[in-house]
Image (cartoon, grey):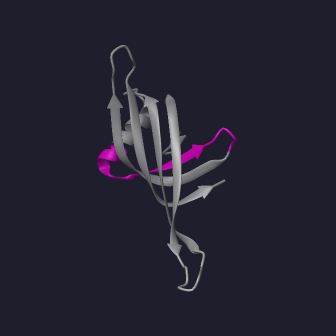
Amino acid sequence: MTVGGSALTGIIDATATLNMETIETTELTATDRSYVAGIKSGTISATVFYDSADTVQAAIETAYAAGSTVAVVFTWHSGNTYTCNALITSVSPSVAVNDVIRCSFQMQITGAVTIV
C-alpha cells in the first residue's frame, strides 16, 4: 500500500471495503424485486508496527490533523490495485505489556476508485 506516493511499511494487516447502495425499482404488480446501482463508497483500514520516525506514518497523522485527503494505492498480492483518494478518519496507536507499539488507521474513500 502506498500513501501519498510512498510505501507504508510495517503493515500487519490491511483491508479495503467497497460498497454500492442499491435503489429499488420494483413495480407495484411485480412478484420479484428489482434494483439499479446507486452511490458507491468505501473504506480502507491498516494496522502497522508504529514507528514515529516513519515519514509515511507521520504524513498520515498530519493529514488526519489537517483534515486533508491522501492518495492511496492498495495493491493485492495478485497485482490488482485500487487507486483512490481518502480522508484519514481515525488514528489509533495501542500498546500492551511485552509487545511492540501498533497503530491502526481508518480511511474514508472520497471520489471514485480506479480498479486495475
In front of the other: 49 or 97: 97
Q: How many marks?
A: 0
Q: Residue furthest right?
A: 78
The outermost residue toward the left is: 65
Q: Residue at x 32, y 52 (%)?
A: 67
Could you tell me if residue 7 is visible in this image? no
Q: Residue at x 49, y 50 (%)?
A: 71
Is 31 positioned to the left or the right of 101 in the image?
Answer: right
Q: Position of residue 30 (x, y in %)?
A: 59, 82
Q: Is residue 65 magenta?
A: yes
Does residue 103 show up? yes
Against 18, is 90 above or below? above
Q: Which residue in the rendered view is the most extreme toward the bottom?
A: 29
Return the x and y of residue 60 as percentages of the image width and height: 39, 41
Q: Is residue 55 above or below residue 41?
A: above
Left or right placement of residue 61 versus residue 17 in this view: left
Magenta-drawn stretch contains 104: no
**Span shown in magenta:** 62-79
Q: What residue is at 59 percent from the left and 51 percent from the top? A: 82
Which image quarter: residue 34? Answer: bottom right
* Image quarter (top left, top right, bottom left or bottom right) of the N terminus: top right
Q: Which residue is pictured at 52% across the width and 42% down the height?
A: 15
Nearer to me, 99 or 7: 99
x, y percent for residue 97: 33, 16
